Amino acid sequence: MKFSEQVDAPIEANLRRRVAGGFILATLMTVLLGFLSWRSAQLAADDADWVAHTYTVMDAIELMSRHVAAAESSARTFSMTGQDSWLTQYETASSTVAQDEDALRSLTADNPNQQRRLDVLEAQVRSALKLAETIVAKRSQLHAAPGASEVLQIERLMNVVLVAGQEMRAEEVQLLSRRTQKTKAGRRFTGFVIVVGIFVGAGLLALARLAINHELDVSAQGREELKISNASLEQRVEQRTTALQSEITERRQAEDAANESLATSEAALKDLADQKFALDQHAIVAVTDVQGTITYVNDKFCAISQYSEDELIGQNHRILNSGHHPKEFFQQMYHIIANGGVWHGEIQNRTKDGSIYWVDTTIVPFIGADGKPQQYVAIRADVTERKLAEKEIQELNDDLELRVAERTAQLETANKELEAFSYSVSHDLRAPLRHIGGFSKLLVEEFGSSLDPNAKHYVERIQSGTQKMGVLVDELLNLARVGRHALSLQPTRLNSIVAEVIAILQPDSQGRQIEWAIADLPAVECDPVLVKQVFQNLLSNALKFTRPRADADGSARTGTPAPTLHAVIEVSHKEEVGQSVFMVRDNGVGFSMKYVDKLFGVFQRLHSAEEFEGTGIGLVTVQRIVQKHGGRVWAEAVPGKGATFYFTLGVEKQVESKSSGATAGGQS
Amino acid sequence: MNSGDLDILLVEDNQDDMDLALHALKREKLANRIFVARDGEEALDFLFCRGAFAQRSFEHPPKLVLLDLKLPKVDGMEVLKQIKSDPRTKTIPIVIMTSSKEERDLVSGYNLGANSYIQKPVDFDQFRETVKSVGLYWLVINQPAPVSGVRELAAARP
């Protein structure tokens, strides 16, 4: 709306100016035409007046001329006749001439030329009349008739008077003609002006019509625009109306909601009151302002702190501090709650009489409209008994830990002693063995020729003894090492270990017919160095105890069992109760299950040293290693048929068996 | 080769072990130019040319040091450490020859720069074999570091 106003204003002003200009011009034209018409009529009237005036003047001249002529003729007649009637006539006529002169003078007052002529005429008239009087007087007094010269003179005078009168008349007629001509020219100009005025008026009207038409067009366009603008306005009004209506609806809904929420609020307030009651029944509740000044406490708070409500309200909450917590404890707490966070923790407080109590505390800041805490609500539970119990437990734990530390130290000392022992065994025990062996060897080598065969035999027994002792020492040291060895678990392909061990044992199986039956074994999480020792001991045992089986050439070394069967050593595994059980089976001499309990004891042997050499430490080492892995080892055997050793490496040590497939390919 | 040249420095406190080792070396003709130090201190004095060995020169180091670990006064590991941390002696081959094959000894021995680690076998034949192999390898097969290089290293030392 404002926009179109701005656009229309100059157009309208322009239009107004043009219309006003047109009207002023038309009015001026009309006034001019009227004035010219009036002027024309005026001129016509003047014209008629002047014609009448001219005729009056001419009449007056005529009259005076006639009266002069009458006076002269009557005077002349009297002079000749002496009849008195002429004298009367003469006297009447001459007196009338004076009147006529006056009348004429006033009639021609406006014309100086006529006045001058009138002066001449009057003088001539007076001359003529004087002459007439002279002859009249002569007659009357002398009774003499006029001379001829007098008559001639008078006649001449009379002619002059007549001519002067005629001149005056001619002057008047000429004047009239000039005036009439001037009037006619005025009338023509007026007529011309009127005609031009009519045309100009018509032209102006035509222009006005054009202008009005144009303005009508413009206004029609304006109306159209107005219509469009009105339509848009109406649309906007409609939109606004719709908006207002929806606003009103919303407000109404909001009002409804507010009413509803008021009802809800009332219900909530009741709920809140109920909950507060419930809370007060259970918890120790206090409210403080942001400075920590207590503004509310419930009965339980008063009961536990031993202060009355009056003693607490208005006091800073510090009144209850026991001094147990460091300054930083409360600084941290205030930092959290002052930033709108909820703090939870256990606080030791002091009652009015100085005794100590513990409260499990939750502090909730109530946030105001400005986003800052307005007050803090602390909800607490008495946990004094629990804290005391905890303290007792803590003391017991501390005591226990102390004892564990002591025991550990003792064990560590013992372990160190053991280590030092085995270290010195490995050094100091082997050295004399070497010396005995070395020197006895030199004895045989350098003095063998001078030795009695028996002496030689004894020296050999000494050497053999030192060698056995050397092995024994080494195995014992190994067992000790296994005990100390820290497990280094890694995913291990057992088939590779088995293959490695078989290669190591190659010298022992030299020249024997042995069937190795190695199944695909899974990869497991274990210490490969130790597990290798397990297989080395078990497979070495299997080799040893299958020695009575047929040799490569088919003959048996000992009588039992049936020499026709060759040695079969089997390594396999099975899944049992979620864990892998590994098996090493042989078809050797076996053993009686009667002695199975002794199998894993140190230095325990089920066979004589003559039959099968050994120290009785190998299986102990196996057991030690398996147990270190969290597994167990056991054996089954039938005398003369063979033995099977089983072991596991702990339930959760097994790696996904996906790598066992890869192992399978490399196994023969 | 002058009179200062030496093949083997045997560091051994135990008379029995020393006798057996010398016996084995002699049999292999490896004991012609050998010196036996009876404790760690003597071994260090010998190698660093000081004390009773002040007349010795760094220019004539032994071709091989056979070092026991359990030694009086200064133990074998300390001897090893000092030899291997001094530019004048660090190129001398040190073979630890001891009764023990304790893991901790092996680890610290190699960490300190031992060139080899041998456990003395209980069996005397095996012992002789071992001594023979070691002697042949270090005295015959192995090419020792040039002495001039050692001298330069020693000169470079502040």
Image: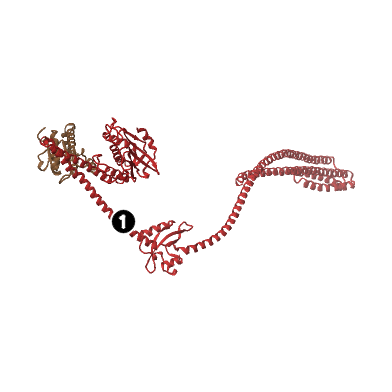
For the residue pair A312 and A232, the one nearer the viewer reads as: A312
Q: Residue at x 41, y 64 (%)?
A: A317
Residue B98 seen: no
For the residue pair A202 and A501, the one nearer the viewer reads as: A501
On screen, residue A121 versus residue B158, left or right, reads right
* Local secondary structure at mark 1: helix
Find residue A150 and report its horizontal and vertical position in percent. Answer: 83, 41
Chain rendered brown: B
- Few, some or many residues within 10 Å of mark 1 (<14, 14–19, 20+): few
In the rendered image, the quadrant that contains the C terminus of chain A is top left
Find residue A334 and report its horizontal and vertical position in percent. Answer: 40, 59
On screen, residue B66 versus residue A558, left or right, reads left
**For residue A476, what is the image quadrant?**
top left
Chain rendered red: A
**What colouring does the structure picture have?**
by chain
On screen, residue A573 versus residue A153, left or right, reads left
- Tell me the chain of label 1: A
Q: Amino acid at mark 1?
A: Glu
Query: Which residue does the numbered mark 1 point to in the structure image?
Result: A401
Find residue A274 and report its horizontal and vertical position in percent. Answer: 52, 62
Q: Is residue A310 above or below residue A38?
A: below
Query: How many dots with numbers?
Result: 1
**For residue B69, what is the image quadrant?**
top left
Q: Is residue A301 above or below residue A508?
A: below
